[in-house]
């Protein structure tokens, strides 16, 4: 069995934190500076991404305690979705990969992201068939080696039978160091994405010599 792991932000969906932060500030009734300087600069989002907050409720409670912004899950989703734009070619490539093997997310994100995928990413939820691996569940972030080995373990495959598609070169190199195949997904100077290269990499992997 071949497994095709896709990053989410800036790979399947374009992502702009500068759209998310003001929306969070508006909904939470606090300044952007307070949010950025307490939650993000304080390392809380990174901690959430490795599973420090095991449930969405714990995450939102901690967010309110640290920042003073009391958000509902729906408000959190509204701000997150405001920062996401589907990359049409990448989503088509994900669907194409699903005809060749098993597809899965492999994303550095907290539990609320996983719980909110039907709202945030309706274009991909059906094709994933529940394969929505996030770092918070796996207890490690890319490019740590253990996130790759744990992800592979979920599917019972050896590294050589899996490929990662990711916009981060560090994450790509981490996957390769773990023995996986990987493709560095890039955005061109003109603002378009190399979705053609993505599709070529999918087929090259599918047709590789065993």
Image: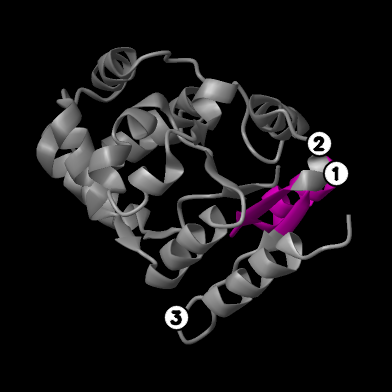
The circle on residue 179 is: 1
For residue 185, which quarter of the picture?
bottom right
Question: Is label 1 in a helix, a strand or a loop?
Answer: loop
Residue drawn at x 77%, y 45% is 161
Q: Position of residue 67 (x, y in %)?
A: 27, 25
User: For mark 3, does the 10 Å Cα neighbourhood hold few (<14), some (14 to 19), or many (20 or more) residues?
Assistant: few
**Sequence-wise first label, 2 or 3:** 2
Q: Position of residue 74 (x, y in %)?
A: 15, 33
Colour convention of the picture: one colour
Residue drawn at x 62%, y 33% is 141
Q: Nearer the viewer, mark 1 or mark 2?
A: 2
Which quarter of the rendered picture does the N terminus lie within?
top right
**Sequence-wise first label, 1 or 2:** 2
| Residue on which disc 2 sits | 158
| Residue on which disc 3 sits | 191
Count the marks: how many? Answer: 3
Do the CB atoms of the residues marked 2 and 3 lie less than 8 Å apart?
A: no
């Amino acid at each position: 069995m071949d497994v095709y792991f896709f990053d989410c932000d800036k790979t399947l969906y374009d992502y702009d934190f500068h759209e998310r932060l003001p929306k969070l500030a508006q909904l939470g009734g606090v300044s952007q500076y307070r949010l950025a300087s307490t939650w993000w600069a304080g390392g809380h989002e990174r901690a959430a991404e490795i599973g420090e907050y095991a449930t969405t409720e714990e995450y939102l409670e901690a967010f309110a305690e640290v920042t003073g912004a009391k958000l509902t899950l729906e408000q959190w989703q509204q701000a997150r979705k405001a920062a996401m734009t589907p990359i049409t070619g990448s989503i088509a490539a994900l669907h194409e990969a699903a005809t060749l093997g098993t597809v899965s997310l492999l994303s550095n994100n907290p539990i609320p992201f996983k719980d909110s995928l039907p709202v945030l990413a309706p274009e991909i939820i059906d094709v994933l068939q529940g394969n929505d691996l996030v770092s918070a569940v796996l207890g490690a972030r890319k490019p740590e080696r253990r996130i790759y080995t744990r992800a592979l373990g979920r599917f019972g495959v050896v590294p050589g039978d899996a490929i990662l598609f990711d916009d981060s070169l560090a994450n790509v190199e981490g996957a390769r160091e773990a023995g996986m195949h990987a493709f560095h997904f890039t955005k061109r100077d003109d603002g378009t994405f190399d979705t053609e290269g993505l599709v070529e990499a999918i087929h090259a992997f599918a047709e590789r010599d065993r």
